Amino acid sequence: MKVKHLGDVKEEIVAKANSTKTTVRWLITKDDGAKGFATRRFEIQPGGQVGLHDHAEDHQIYVLQGKSQLIDEKGNKVELKKGDAIYIPPNEKHGFQNNGDEPFMFICVIPYLE
Amino acid sequence: MKVKHLGDVKEEIVAKANSTKTTVRWLITKDDGAKGFATRRFEIQPGGQVGLHDHAEDHQIYVLQGKSQLIDEKGNKVELKKGDAIYIPPNEKHGFQNNGDEPFMFICVIPYLE
């Protein structure tokens, strides 16, 4: 087994999907031996966003801290908070807007598609 | 997409693997449309444990709160804390012992094997 602390995992700036003030750490990946899926931890600073986008990979998300708006494919906004779990199916548009005053942090698990 | 709060998900007692003082909430599952894997949130109370066990499913784990000992297949104990990410390969023995004084909470993602 492999144990690491998030502070030891490289923090990368997210530029895709018109993202701003957003970083990601790929916590568990193929490099650790994981085959089916990967665990990432995102952080969006106040005023930051991940723009509306879609892709073939579905998402399983768990909110760790902070608040944010989740924007769906119709443009509807849902308020997210700590302890929320979100399932986003493949090819469904989604985005995040941190309209709060603290960092918004979440775990997002994504499959490795063949 | 589907959004739910952990408090709205049934909390179940974990009895497998000689577990004590341990509960699980299956946050995102096949019932939500997820095909490849499921997101669960475990809670082990002080003095509780998940006994040493193994299975074909690998685990991707993220520690949310508290401290615990992770026991590996050789009986070695690793101290876990908030922000730790753990990868446990298929068929590798593992267990948890909450030897702290607060609840130990973690996310554990597990594949649906065919």
Image: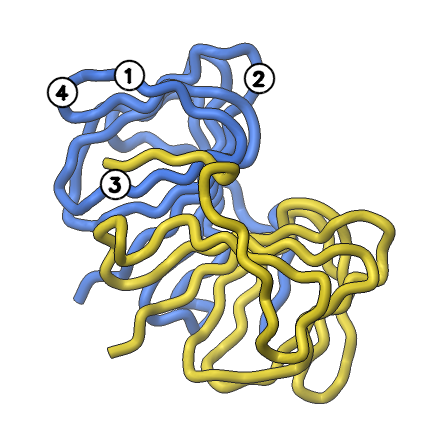
Chain colours: A blue, B yellow
**Do marks 2 and 4 share a chain?**
yes
Looking at the rendered structure, the secondary structure element under dot 3 is strand
* For residue B82, above or below residue A16: below
Which quarter of the figure is the N terminus of chain B placed in? top left
Considering only order in the chain, which callout, 2 or 3, is on the residue closer to the N terminus? 3
Q: Which residue is mark 1?
A: A77
Residue at 86% across / 51% down in the picture? B101
Q: Chain of mark 4?
A: A
Q: Does the image show residue A12?
A: no
**Amino acid, disc 4:** Lys
**Do marks 4 and 1 share a chain?**
yes
Mark 3 or 2: in front is: 3
Place of residue B83 in the rendered image (x, y in percent of width and height, measured from the top left): 64, 47
Q: Alpha-carbon neighbours of circle 2 within 10 Å: few (<14), some, or many (≥20)?
A: some
Considering only order in the chain, which callout, 4 or 2, is on the residue closer to the N terminus? 4
Q: CA distance from mark 3 to mark 2?
A: 24 Å
Mark 2 or 1: in front is: 1
**Amino acid, disc 1:** Lys
Considering only order in the chain, which callout, 3 or 1, is on the residue closer to the N terminus? 1
Mark 2 or 4: in front is: 4
State if disc 1 and disc 4 touch (CB < 8 Å): no
* For residue A21, above or below residue A55: above
Q: Which residue is mark 3?
A: A88
State if disc 3 and disc 1 touch (CB < 8 Å): no
Q: CA distance from mark 2 to mark 1?
A: 19 Å
Q: Which residue is mark 4?
A: A74
Residue A77 appears in which quarter of the rendering? top left
Q: Alpha-carbon neighbours of circle 4 within 10 Å: few (<14), some, or many (≥20)?
A: few
Residue at 26% across / 49% down in the picture? B32
